[in-house]
Amino acid sequence: MTLSEAIETLKTTLDPRKFLQSLERAADFYSESDSEQDSDSGDDSGNGPSDSSSGSQSGDSFKGSGAAVKTAALSNGTTPLIKLTDVWKIYQMGEVEFAALKGIDLEIYEGEFVVVLGPSGSGKSTLMNLLGCLDLPSRGAVFLQDRDISELDESELARIRGQMIGFIFQSFNLIPTLGTLENVTLPLEFQEMDPGKARRRAEYLLDIVGLSDKKKNLPSQLSGGQRQRVAIARSLAVNPPVILADEPTGNLDSKTGNYILEFLEKLHEQEGKTIIIVTHDLELVKYATRVVYIRDGEIEKIEHAEKHAEKHAEKHAEKNEMEE
Ligand SMILES: Nc1ncnc2c1ncn2[C@@H]1O[C@H](COP(=O)(O)OP(=O)(O)OP(=O)(O)O)[C@@H](O)[C@H]1O
Ligand SMILES: [Mg+2]
């Protein structure tokens, strides 16, 4: 299928059927354009919160290294993708110290769908910033693919993070002066993707999230749900193996919220992406393979989710039968 045929097929608003069908085609598109992209992949995707500044780093020294990072991430199922060891985050406010995270131990493995559940103020966004290697802990260590991030220099960390993790922030973090299409294209520009190719991928992703008719709108000219969908399209732009989302449905009506979760679930099930969501919404637990309960900056308990545990057991049994 040619790209224009694909885009034609995917002319979809948020019709869930079309929306989900379109995902099935996404894998083909990615495998096509990844093989092209890997030969010229560059620096930071810029999809972190420092979007506007991270583009200043030179990508030259990192050319061609994207494939190696991804392969390493996907080939070793026993090493956690992300590991937090006795992580503390202490905010200093004048004389007063506030511990937002108190000794967090957490490992995230490839293929998991982890929901971090906790009330407002419990430390979820703080934890997300640490899991996403956007912030350094006050105490303790964060490992990204077995490498202590405090030992990486800033540009190396930005490069690995940019290729491995797509962020969907609580406050969207869209660039207010850029239109929808430009916001989605930005991480690809940081990867030094050919501008024509970057534009086609951004258009494709906007089609998937049903925003083809809003390409030129600024974030201020979009509804909250539409902004969230731009943020999702942007998080997928570099096709990272891990998606980290902070309250992805927080500002949405329940119908749009469900579409977005089904979308994330398909990314998990069909493309094997590792998904981490932080939320206060108990409803989201049903999508999880593991639920981490957080309260007052501490992990209260960790549960393997029933539904998925059963599903995985079935898959395992099938696999064993086939091998016998
Ligand atoms: N920069 C900061 N300085 C001081 N305190 C902070 C800072 N950022 C967060 N906090 C405090 O740390 C705690 C955890 O904040 P965080 O944003 O992680 O909570 P959250 O679980 O994401 O909440 P919500 O569900 O409302 O988004 C809160 O009590 C907050 O007031
Ligand atoms: Mg938060």
Image (cartoon, rainbow, N blue to C red):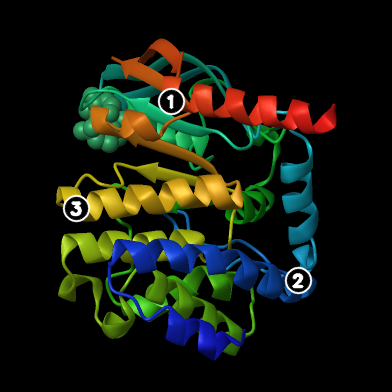
Q: CA distance from mark 2 to mark 1?
A: 35 Å
Residue 267: give x, y in percent of width and height: 51, 52
Q: Is residue 225 left or right of residue 196?
A: left
What quarter of the picture does the N terminus occupy? Answer: bottom right
Amino acid of disc 2:
Ser
Query: Quadrant location of residue 217?
Result: bottom left
Query: Quadrant location of residue 99?
Result: top left
Please say if 127 is above or below 267. Answer: above
Element assignment for label 2? helix
Residue 183, visible in the rendered structure: no
Q: Earlier in the sequence, mark 2 or mark 3?
A: 2
Res 35 label: 2
Element assignment for label 3? helix
Please say if 101 is above or below 198. Answer: above
Q: Contact, CB < 8 Å: mark 2 with mark 3?
A: no
Res 63 label: none
Q: Identify residue for label 1.
A: 307
Please say if 13 is above or below 246. Answer: below
Amino acid of disc 1:
Lys
Q: Nearer the viewer, mark 2 or mark 3?
A: 3
Number of labels in the image equals: 3
Element assignment for label 1? helix
**Residue density around tag 1, few if under 14, some if 14–19, many if 20 or more, within 10 Å:** some
- The residue depicted at 27 percent of the width and 22 percent of the height is 122
In the image, the residue with mark 1 has its CB under 8 Å from the nearest atom of ligand 1: no
Q: Identify residue for label 3.
A: 255
Amino acid of disc 3:
Lys
